[in-house]
Image (cartoon, rainbow, N blue to C red):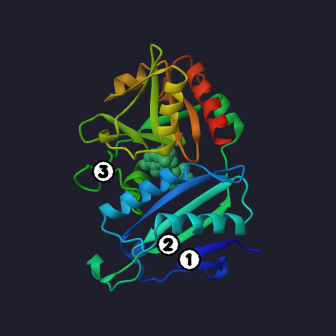
Amino acid sequence: MGLKIWLGQGLVDEKDAVISVFDRSLLYGDGVFEGIRVYSGKVFELKAHLDRLYESASVIRLPIGMTQEQMSQAIETTVKANAIQDGYIRLIVTRGIGDLGLDPFVCKNGKVIVIADNVKLYPEEFYEAGMKVISASTIRNHPMALPPQIKSLNYLNNILAKIEAVEAGHGEAIMYNHLGYVAEATGDNIFIVKGGTVQTPPIQAGSLDGITRRVVIRLAKEDGMCVVEKNLTRFDLYTADEMFLTGTAAEVIGVVEMDGRVIGNGKPGPITKRLRSLFFQAAHS
Ligand code: PXG
């Protein structure tokens, strides 16, 4: 039996969840999306994800055609219909079907798709050993081109960097911005720890305003840690005591090697572990 997918106005069987070849998400990557976790039957940070989705949509002038309240209902309905206790939600809004031209305004309202499925997690050893990353030569989108704060359906910028990571035999690549400062990883935000201070690039350095990043900053502060948002260089990363990534899929994961250089003592550090554990508690509370 397949999944129940929310498509447009209600649930359909997975086999009937199809969209047109004229859909602008296919033709132009014209739309926005969110990836959200379900922990113990509860949708994690739903309001924050919806705010980000609606902001992304508004910047690209995409009317969603549903209130946030209706969107929450659609998500809850889809999660329940698939009996998801611990899983992953992919929320997509495409601009829908137009003609073959670029003009977006021929489409009146977006089309909403909600997929709720079980989540594929990294194996626990990955978290214990930490991951290795490289610096991508592909820089992050210039903020005056496609602003990295928009979680758009066009991920080619990040995919080009991901290709570099995979070809180097690693799971993630660190992306820099047009000024040479650290922006983020291809699907995660980045943090370092230096001299006991938790540091992360400001969103304006060219990253997605990650929900996991926000939660981790809050948890770190509540735990009495000093958190600083500032521009970071490749030098700062190489000389960090600890490095970790945050994201909906990865949660909090230590980085132990970058561009062949060992970070810290080559194992996920104590602050990384502490924040991973605090995050786990917050997610399951
Ligand atoms: N930066 C980028 C570019 C992202 O795509 C994050 C940071 C972390 O944000 P959140 O809000 O998730 O803490 C993301 C996350 C995946 C996957 O399966 C992740 C993302 C998108 C698509 C797939 O790992 N985005």
Direction from residue 226 to residue 132 in the image, left or right: right
Q: Nearer the viewer, residue 154 or 74?
A: 74
Residue furthest out toward the right: 1
Task: Indicate the quadrant containing the C terminus: top left, top right, bottom left or bottom right.
Answer: top right
The residue at which mark 2 appears reads as: 112
> Is residue 137 at all visible to an observer of this figure?
yes
Q: Residue 272 placed where, x, y %?
A: 57, 26
Amino acid type shown at disc 3: Asn
Earlier in the chain: of badge 1 and badge 2, it is 1
Residue 124 place in picture, x, y as percent = 71, 37
69 left or right, relative to 95: right
Disc 1 is placed on an element classified as strand
Image point (48%, 32%), residue name? 217
Q: Position of residue 212 (x, y in %)?
A: 52, 42
C-alpha span from label 2 to label 3: 26 Å
Q: Say what amino acid the circle numbered 2 marks.
A: Val
Asked whether the viewer can see residue 256, the reply is no
What is the crowding at mark 1: few (fewer than 14 residues within 10 Å), some, or many (at least 20)?
many
Residue 74, quarter of picture: bottom right
Q: Residues within 10 Å of mark 2 (few under 14, many from 20)?
A: many
- Looking at the image, the residue that sits furthest to the top is 195
Residue labelled with disc 3: 141
Q: Circle 1 sits on which residue?
A: 7
What's the CA distance linking mark 1 and mark 3? 30 Å
The numbered mark, 2 or 3, whose residue comes first in the sequence reads: 2
**The residue carrying mark 1 has its beta carbon less than 8 Å from ligand 1:** no
Helix, strand or loop at mark 2: strand
